[in-house]
Structures are given as structure tokens and as C-alpha cells.
Image (cartoon, rainbow, N blue to C red):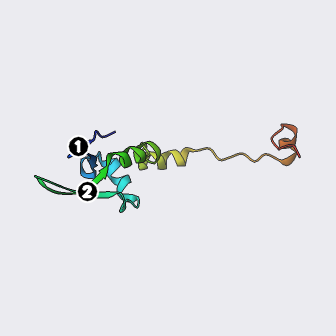
């Protein structure tokens, strides 16, 4: 997780400072409402996100697995086995009615 920058009491991160996989994932989302601009002595930083929003995204949305690895995991995922109604009933897999 990226550490926060602080400017005049505003805790934020710059998207361009994030690791490439995080940049890619955050750019794929509809983050237009989350991106803020901060005017500093260095100039206008136009790719900022409040640190609070970044932490929420990182904790709840960000997938740490790379897309290539996700595809490989999907390919190797075993096919679900079909279980007959009678076997479900025998093994208690159906709710009581």
C-alpha cells in the first residue's frame, strides 16, 4: 500500500506514483469522481486521490493477483461436478422443507 502524501493537511496519493498493476486497475475503474487536483508550489497535481478513498479501494477492491495470473487460474480451475438430486438429498445438501 502506498504511503500518503500530505499537503496543507490534505492526505492524498498520486496515481502516477502507484505500482504499475495498481495504476492499471485504478484507471480501469470509473474513478472520475475520486480524482482530485491539488495546486502546490511545484504546480498542479491532477492525478490525485484522497488517501481515505485510496485505502478503501486498496482494501476492498484492489486485486493483488496480476491479470495474467488470474487468467491462468481460470484455465486450471476444475470443472464443477454434477451432483444428482438424489445424492444431494442423501448427503444433506438440500435445505429442509
> Which quadrant of the rendered structure holds the N terminus?
top left
Q: Which residue is mark 2?
A: 47
Residue 7 vs residue 30: left or right?
Answer: left
Q: Position of residue 43 (x, y in %)?
A: 12, 56
> Mark 2 against mark 1, which lies toward the viewer?
1
In front here: 8 or 75? 8
Per the image, label 1 sits on a secondary structure element best described as: strand
Asked if residue 14 is positioned above or below residue 87 in the image, the reply reads below
Residue 55 vertical placement versus 25 (above, below): above
- Where is residue 18 drawn, in percent x and y? 28, 46
What x and y, as percent, mark residue 65? 43, 43
Q: CA distance from mark 2 to mark 1?
A: 15 Å
Badge 2, how many Cα within 10 Å: few under 14, some, many 20+? some
**Residue at the spot 41% in from the left edge and 48% down from the top edge:** 57
- Left or right of 36? Residue 90 is right
Residue at 51% across, 44% down: 73
Splitting the image into 4 quarters, where does residue 33 fall?
A: bottom left
Q: First in sequence: mark 2 or mark 1?
A: 1
Give the structural element (helix, strand or loop) at label 2.
Answer: strand
Disc 1 marks which residue? 6
- Residue for point 53% across, 48% down: 74
Q: Nearer the viewer, residue 63 or 57?
A: 57
Outermost residue to the left? 41
Position of residue 47 measured from the top left corner of the image (x, y, whole percent) = 25, 56
Asked if the residue under mark 1 is in contact with the one under mark 2, i.e. CB atoms within 8 Å, the reply is no
| Residue beneath the point at 10% across and 52% down | 41
Amino acid at each position: 500500500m502506498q504511503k500518503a502524501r500530505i499537503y496543507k493537511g490534505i492526505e492524498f496519493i498520486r496515481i502516477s506514483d502507484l505500482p504499475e498493476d495498481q495504476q492499471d486497475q485504478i484507471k480501469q475503474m470509473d474513478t472520475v469522481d475520486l480524482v482530485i487536483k491539488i495546486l502546490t508550489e511545484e504546480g498542479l497535481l491532477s492525478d490525485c486521490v484522497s488517501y481515505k478513498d485510496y485505502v478503501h479501494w486498496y482494501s476492498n477492491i484492489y486485486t493483488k493477483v496480476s491479470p495474467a495470473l488470474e487468467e491462468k487460474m481460470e484455465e486450471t480451475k476444475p470443472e464443477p461436478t454434477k451432483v444428482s438430486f438424489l445424492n444431494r438429498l442423501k448427503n444433506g445438501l438440500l435445505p429442509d422443507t
